[in-house]
Amino acid sequence: MAENSTRYSQTKKGNEKDSPRNSSKYFHLRFIVPGDVQELAAIRDRVEKQSASMNLSDEEAYQIVSAVDETCTNIIKHAYQGKEGNIEISLKVDSERFEIEVADKGIYFDPTLNIPQEIDQEKIGRQKGGLGLFIIKKTMDDLNYRFTMSGENKLHLVKYFRSE
Amino acid sequence: MKTLEITHRMDKKGVLFLKVAGFIDASNINFFDRELNSQMEKGYNKIILDCSELQYLNSSALGILLEAHQTAVKQQGGIRILNLPQKIEKTFNILGFNEYFQIFSDEAKAVQSLL
């Protein structure tokens, strides 16, 4: 049974000197939402609000929001395949990077195996997947997948801050 | 609250304006797909997508747009993008979609490019 409410925890950390970012805004935020397309807007809204607190450019924030949206959409479509299940999203920010981990307990689904190298406009159609992964690959700096002992798909994404 | 609103306007020169306000994601992608393709099935193949009030569009929407554009081009038409918010345009460019779509901030120039 999917949870209707969202679990939420947040930890502030850090007081490093010489940071290009305001260290009081470092955070580690974790929340769990039902794997349902109707939840995507709320997920994007929450990620956008956290990004906005980090002095990211609009473009960087949009790309992070987009990567999370595409990842969650893939989970709903391919890992849960219409069945109920939760998605756990973890956002971790320090002076250098914005890290995102998205976990689900659906069927094994390694999205990194399906990333197109280029947009093939002859093959891109509404029925074909892969463009979302292409967006994630192009906009995020690191992309790693693992399947855990407890049967979770975990996708780890990192975007490094541009030096100022 | 409506998540996506699509309004139509026909230009005197036969160019169809579709204004998309809100966001396009997996929750409403079928609505966007139906609206765009129903217009094309009616024979409109010169379309300007007004994105001035677009907050977000996902990869499926990009795929649908690209496919629709290719169909329109084969019929001597095309899809033009108008007033795309800068944060979305940057992502468009990173993906190379600016090679496929002409993006305008001037409505008259967008119309002219289709005539």
Image: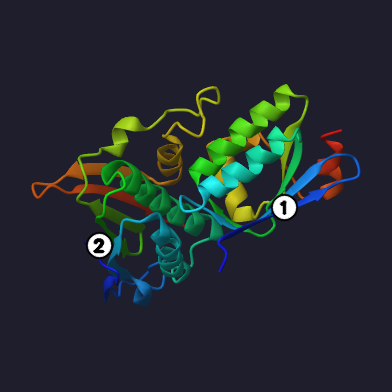
Q: Amino acid at mark 2?
A: Ala
Q: Is residue A15 above or below residue B25?
A: below
Image height check: is A29 above or below A151?
below
**Circle 2 chain:** A
State the SS at label 2.
loop
Please tell me which residue is depicted at 50% across the width and 34% down the height of the picture: A126
* 10 Å crowding of disc 1: few (<14), some (14-19), many (20+): some
> Is the C-beta separation of discs 2 and 1 under 8 Å?
no
Report if residue B78 is visible in the image. yes
**In the rendering, at what x and y percent does residue A156 appear?**
28, 49
Closer to the camera in the image, B54 or A18: B54
- Residue A88: x, y in percent? 26, 59
Residue A147 appears in which quarter of the rendering? top left
Q: Is residue B62 left or right of residue A108?
A: right
Chain ID at mark 1: B
| Disc nearest the viewer among 2 and 1 | 2
Mark 2 — residue? A2
Residue A4 is drawn in which quadrant? bottom left
x then y, percent, for residue A159: 38, 52
Q: Amino acid at mark 1?
A: Asn
Q: Is B64 situated left or right of A97 in this image?
A: right
Residue A162 can be seen in this image: no
Residue at mark 2 to residue at mark 1: CA–CA distance:
39 Å
Report the residue marked by disc 1. B83
Callout 1 secondary element: loop
